Image (spheres, grey):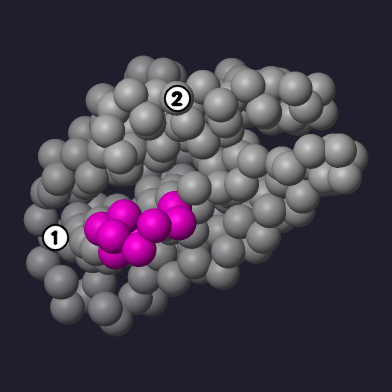
Amino acid sequence: MNISEQLWQTRRAWAAALRYHRFLWVVGIFISILLLIGSGMPAFFNYLEQRPGWAPDDPLLGLIPATGLSGPIFGLIYLLLAYIIMRGMVSPPLLLHFLAGYVFMMLARIITLTLVPLEPPVGLIPLIDPGADLFYGGRNVTKDLFFSGHTATAFLIYLCLQERKEKALALGALIALAIMLLIQHIHYTIDVIAAFPITYVCHKLSRQVAAFTWASHSRRAEAPVDR
């Protein structure tokens, strides 16, 4: 497919999506929720850093010498985010799918972080995060542990992508990211493992949102699909 055909298909997909008022409402609602969450994150992380927690025993981390890998970690996660956003610009249903899943994942993290107070793993090397000023209020956050947001985001991207080659690349990036988080002692092993089932549930919820979004128009016109 050449560039002109891709642009034509993109315009057609968005023209179809924008005919669905429910699509606009749902996207607007989830963007608003995401902005609301983002605005409250600095205060929430400040609360997490000030409260005491407990440090579970992690035999796996005890076997791994801590090594700083902030550059590769954020290179991978931002590359994945840039790719899914770019794909979302081409496919409105994919954009909605990821947006809804990400919001559900963020809400789930707020709940689990509140309910499971943890102290940082022994030997933790703080992440040097280019987005720290935006999301963390410029402070070094080490207690946003259960569950791993980086792992969850990468897994959600993998679940949202449809093509075989891009899923394979996303899976490779996900595995590498999870390993590097443990090598840097950013998370306990349970933080990384728990991200998978929780994110899968968020992914399933986002598919329900997509089904609801297109349901009222399915008989009048063919609704767009993830691609």
- Drawn side of residue 147 relative to residue 73, left or right: right
Mark sitting on residue 135: none
Can residue 210 be seen here?
Answer: yes
- Graded by Cα atoms within 10 Å as few (under 14), some (14 to 19) or many (20 or more), the crowding at tag 2 reads few
- Under mark 2, the amino acid is Trp
Which secondary structure lies at badge 2? helix
Q: Main secondary structure of the magenta part?
A: helix
Residue 77: x and y in percent read: 30, 43
* Residue topped by disc 1: 66
Which image quarter is the N terminus in? top left
Q: Quadrant of residue 24?
A: top right
Nearer to us: label 2 or label 1:
2
- Residue under the point 33% across and 33% down: 82
- Where 118 falls versus 65 (above or below)? above
- Under mark 1, the amino acid is Ala
- Drawn side of residue 116 relative to residue 119, left or right: right
Which residues make up the magenta segment? Answer: 161-169
Nearest to the observer: residue 3 or residue 71:
3
Residue 36: x and y in percent read: 66, 22
- Residue under the point 78% across and 27% down: 20
Q: Earlier in the sequence, mark 2 or mark 1?
A: 2
- Graded by Cα atoms within 10 Å as few (under 14), some (14 to 19) or many (20 or more), the crowding at tag 1 reads some
Which secondary structure lies at badge 1? loop
- Residue under the point 56% across and 47% down: 226
- Drawn side of residue 72 relative to residue 160, left or right: left
Nearest to the observer: residue 23 or residue 45:
23
Residue 170: x and y in percent read: 31, 56
Residue 177: x and y in percent read: 26, 56
* Residue topped by disc 2: 8
- Residue under the point 22% across and 75% down: 62
Q: Quadrant of residue 31?
A: top right
Nearest to the observer: residue 217 or residue 187:
217
